[in-house]
Image (tube, rainbow, N blue to C red):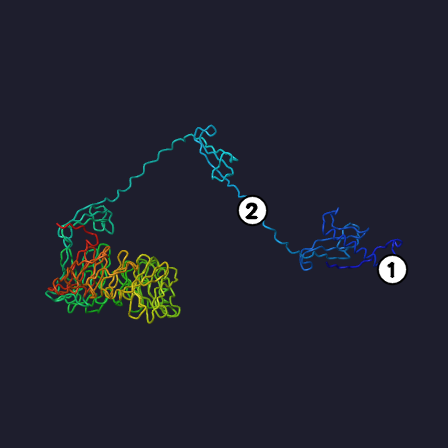
Amino acid sequence: MSTQDNRAAPPEENQDERSQEDRETPPKNKAWAILQGLLLMTALAMGVVNSIQPEPSNSTEVGTNMLVQSESIEPGVLCQEGGVVLSTGMDININAVLDDGEVSSTTHLCNGPMGLSGPQGQPGLNGDTAHAQTLETTPLSPGDPTCPQGGTNLSGGLDLNGNGELDNEEVVTTSLLCNGASGVNGTAGVAGTNGSHGANGPAALIDKQSAPHYVCKDGFVIRFGVDDGHDGAMSQDGLLQPSEVRESLNVCFSPLLYGRVSDLATGITDSITSGCDASTWLPVTERLLVAASHADHGCEAFLHNPATNQTVLLEDLHASSGSQPGREIGFHSLAAGDHDRVFFDADDGVSGRQLWVSDGTVNNTVSLGVVEWQAPLKWADGLVFHASNGSMLWTNGTQLYTLPNAPWWNETQRIHIEAFADGHTQWGSGWTHSDSEHLWFTAVDPQGDVEPHRLTMDGSVTSWNVNPAGDALLNHGLSLESDVYVVAQRGPAKQIVQLMDNGTHSWLTSIAPSAGDTAMGERMGLNLIGENLVFDAQTQPNQPRLWTTHLPSGISVQLSTTMLAPGLNAGATVSGNSVVFDCTTPEHGMEVCITDATTMGTRVVLDATPGMLSSSVVAVQSVGEGWLALTNGNHEGSSVGTSLWSSSGTTMNLVYNPWPGTGNDSQAGQYGDLLVSDTQLFFVAHDGETGHEWHRWSHGVLSDDWIVFNR
């Protein structure tokens, strides 16, 4: 405790009452000592119980004119634990209050520090387990004496015996909730007016037609549809147009047909050769457009009509030597309402090789202009091509547009795309990919790096920075909703990266080769089976294997240690829950193989050429839930040349050999593609009499489109 003493003259004292000791002490000093002791005792008493003062004021009168005043001190610099300040002085104005001008002495009394906490007491005994509060309800039927309209009886209490029920002796409170009486019926409202009759809906139609004779010689087709004018047809005209058909029942009473469909270069001469073998199927008019050589016209475009089994010249674009249509980019068809549009490159001998479009008639076969000869992408109901200046072009067959000036953009969208184009060059020069909503492409950004970008149908552009240290080298592409999975260079080896909708990316694989690159997807590309990507990759130079990556977990595993070179010749095709491809195994050689993205479901479909001898798998194509393959093999104990085989995934069956006989080989698939229409499959083969020509096979049984009864 600290004190501060401001001395004042003490009052006079009775000299007769002083002791001998007092006489030895100077009178003034002794009086002041007595006063200090009195003040200290008074302060201590006031600090403990300041509320017992009989007067409202906190001043204490000492003698006649001396006052003492106390005031609490909050914890602070003067007193760390708080305390009391005492002020003393003479009550000069005799108002019983120590005014500021009357203070002659101030003393601070500080509280001592707080003591340490005492030791923790022993834990108390556990209390009894509380009884569960229970509420039970009992419905009361109408007619109850208390609740005539029925209601509910609520009983509450404690479950003392713990049996989970509220026994009668445990009930503490009871309440009744009675239903109110039903009110009287309201007056009937005014009847509303009858609504107007709705327009008659389109009628359902059923008709019966003869089976297409190029598919079935003896049969019929029952068509079921709605007379609603779907896809440009006339509505409610009583006629079932092809676009109005919803379902059909196809019945044939003989085997479905197959055989050769062309002989443009008569005799054994080949009409289909390398560089003159492009083809496409026109889905609206159901015709086959092919490039073929003719003695009078050279290599030109020809139309085959399966209904009449006739093949005619489309147009002689280059009269002297042939225009070689589709030599660079092939044929690409688009359905456009009630007609087809097919795009191809051709040289008319005047303007050089240009992009052409045709609807299958001479008058509507025209040139669109010059493009770079890279395969186009289908997007926005048209095709996207590359231009020589590094931009991209779009067309639906009417004219070529630079992509920012495509006709569906509004002015705001066009300005936005042009602003992006000002800072980015060489669109699509390294990689392009499309789906129904998005166009993906690489471009050189303002920093000079090649990175991927995405343009949507509403004109928005998203960019990614896959390789911060340089160019992003991309290959392949597989869309899944608004994301895309693509093979990209990551350090020394290719890996799969996911470009996500929000502009970020995530690497899915980290397959580490012992040397060189992974060569990921170079033969099979990327194939999606459920939640698994299936692809080819290598960890040893020139030893590709079959791999899968589980998308949710990002775990990559090799599906087989014995399958070599998957997809080397025929690539891969997906149908249902499986991927079919060609592969080589030490036990079977090259054969048709299948996987469902599991090790147990990865196997050779059939050893068509038994033993270690290989089959020459040329092409595979999915049809319905099965597959068709061009390969050679053994049939009924004899070796057959390259022929058409079908598979359901468990076995393979020979379905068409264009050139039968021992030692004969049709060389099917040497030229052209394995082309599938809605009823038939087309391919080029040699039959020993007419050279390499187009052949067909009706796949209705394999695709479950036809019911066949052999009479």
Residue 418, position in %: x, y?
A: 35, 64
Q: Earlier in the sequence, mark 1 or mark 2?
A: 1
**Residue that appears at 39% across and 60% down:** 502
**Residue that appears at 55% across and 43% down:** 128
Report the side of 679 relative to 7 (left or right): left
- Can residue 138 be seen here? yes
Along the viewing direction, whichever of 511 and 73 lies nearer the viewer: 511
Residue 24 disc label: 1
Q: Label 1 is placed on what type of residue?
A: Glu
Above or below, 99 relative to 693: above
Q: Quadrant of the N terminus?
A: bottom right
Residue 283 disc label: none
**Which residue is identified by label 2?**
126
Q: Label 2 is placed on what type of residue?
A: Asn
Q: Is mark 2 on a helix, strand or loop?
A: loop
Residue 586, position in %: x, y?
A: 24, 66
